[in-house]
Image (cartoon, rainbow, N blue to C red):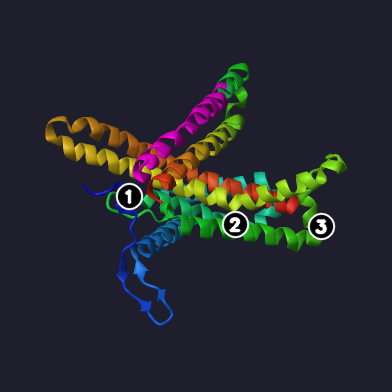
Amino acid sequence: MASPLEQFAIEPIVRITVPDLGLDLSFTNSSLWMGIAVACSYGLVMAGTRQRALVPGRLQALVELAYEFVAGMVRENAGREGMRYFPWIFTLFMFVLFGNLLGIIPGAFTFTSHIIVTFTLAIGVFLGTTAVGFYIHGLRFLTFFVPSGAPKIMLPLLVPIEILSYCFRPISLSIRLFVNMMAGHTMLKIFVGFAVALGILFGWLPFSIIVALNGFEIVVAFLQAYIFTILTCLYLHDAIHLH
Amino acid sequence: MELDAARMIGAGLATIALFGVGTGIGSIFSTLISTVGRNPSVQQRVFPYAIIGFALVEAVALYALLIAFIILFV
């Protein structure tokens, strides 16, 4: 009986190694599905904006919906100045969303279910927002760690705690996304195992649970992409407005 | 005690965290329902916050799952 965790194995498709340096630059199933996610996102936006009709057709309306959704999120949570970073936030949202959604297709690989992928995205967000904070405010950005209205005597206790909770952000951001994806797919795999084991006679019971779980997985895919993006917008707000 | 038995017990104990998570999610949606009940026109405005709150609390549940997996398999 195969383990439900085997579906997360990374298989090289085109093996490219540099044995002398110990590098493995293979084109893997993870890279393939990242490429497919980028192609889907690019194709959707390009095809949707091709007509440029004033009254949008279905595809253009879909792309405009996605654009307005993310633009509204950035404008509301990071302010007018935050719209400078809209291309980055929109790309992040589309990448995570398509990564999550494409993984639900049976036989596909969910590249966001690997901690290294989500950690890279989260570290990008963390370093990016910190860089924005230092670029806009200079060294005054460090006053972010001093909560206003705190008695001076508590500062040696509060400031390290604030710094620690700030540095915890990329960890929580990455773990939230990766564990949601991994737990969802592992649960699906376990129920599939039940359905296969019970056979045709009673297999319909776990199968109906699988159908419901797939629907739930689609909701979780959207939700986790939304949460990742809105938390990025909130961290951007902290960096730009310092409180 | 053997390592495998201790691992199983550790993973089982890690699920105690779900007690707090269930309380948290129930609390969020109970407040949402009573808020919308008092003032139905704010439903559009508070619903995104409820969803964000739910996702953040669910993340804690999944941290517990992560710890259970680490105990079991690492």
- Give the magenta range: B1-30
Whether residue A9 is in magenta: the answer is no
Q: Amino acid at mark 1?
A: Leu
Q: Which one is earlier in the sequence, the residue at label 3 or at label 2?
A: 2
Q: Is residue A121 left or right of residue B72?
A: right
Q: Is residue A213 left or right of residue B26?
A: left
Q: CA distance from mark 3 to mark 2?
A: 20 Å
Q: What percent of the width, then of the height, locates residue A5?
A: 32, 50
Chain where mark 3 sits: A
* Label pair 3/2, CB-CB below 8 angstroms: no
Q: Amino acid at mark 2?
A: Val
Image point (64%, 60%), residue name: A128
Q: Give the mark toward the camera: 3 or 1.
A: 1
Q: Residue furthest bottom?
A: A20
Chain where mark 2 sits: A
Q: CA distance from mark 1 to mark 2?
A: 28 Å
The dot on residue A140 is: 3
Q: Amino acid at mark 3?
A: Arg
Q: What percent of the width, then of the height, locates residue A182?
A: 40, 47
Q: Quadrant of residue A196?
A: top left
